[in-house]
Image (cartoon, rainbow, N blue to C red):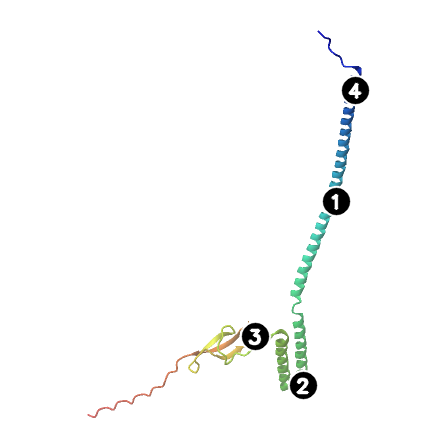
Amino acid sequence: MSKESTPSKGSVEQEEKLQAEAGKDKQDDCQEQAKEQEVVKDALADRIGELDKENTDLKEQLLRKQADFENFRKRLIREKEDSIKYANSNLLLDLVNVMDDFERAIKSSEESRDFESFHSGVEMIEKQLVSLLERKYGLKRFESEGEPFDPEKHEAIAMQDSSDHETMVVLEDFQKGYQLHDRVLRHSKVKVANPVEKVEDTPQSEPKKAKAE
């Protein structure tokens, strides 16, 4: 039988060297992986910090927007209330001027005691007021007497049978109606003719003469 061969010293040293180099490479790989993980970890930490800051900024912006919107809403409500509260300022100012005219007319009548002059002054003020309301505000007073009855404009509070009319016609205007632009603001209160057939007068027949006995 032949003797078993034993590895030479050189081959052992070479194998140990290869194992040492392999271990070093593995250690280097582990260190490299650790460095890469550290870089990734630092990058993630930086990104998380950026996202946290961005989230905080967005929350602050949202709170500011909510506060601005709430202030805007309150301002709109206040402006709406003011517009309703003072909507008639121009009209009232014009009416105040008319009241001044009435005050001057009354004062003048107290001094002169002239009824005709007072009546003329009041009539003139009334015409000016009607013209003012129509010219500046579109408020027009309409006449109804003699007009065909229109339930959209007239409110019949009295009826009178009439054989002189074929349709319902306003006979008398108790209270004037007013129209604001193209809309009736107040119906006029009127008396209306109710058409009835005219009864013809028939001549009475002469009484029969009594027969002579």
Is 10 above or below relative to 158? above
Residue shown at 67% from the left, 64% from the top: 82
Label 2's element?
A: helix
| Cα distance in 3D space between marks 2 and 4 | 144 Å
| Cα distance in 3D space between marks 3 and 2 | 35 Å
| Cα distance in 3D space between marks 4 and 3 | 121 Å
| Cα distance in 3D space between marks 3 and 1 | 67 Å
Label 4's element?
A: helix
Say the numbered circle drawn on residue 112.
2
Q: Are marks 2 and 4 in contact (CB under 8 Å)?
A: no
Residue identifier under label 4: 14
| Cα distance in 3D space between marks 2 and 1 | 87 Å
Residue type beneath disc 3: Tyr
The mark nearer the N terminus, 1 or 4, is: 4
Residue identifier under label 3: 178
Q: Pointer 1: residues within 10 angstroms few (<14), some, or many (20+)?
A: few
The mark nearer the N terminus, 3 or 2, is: 2
Residue 52: horizontal and vertical position, in percent?
73, 43
The mark nearer the N terminus, 2 or 1, is: 1
Say the numbered circle drawn on residue 121.
none
Residue type beneath disc 4: Gln
Residue 36: horizontal and vertical position, in percent?
76, 34
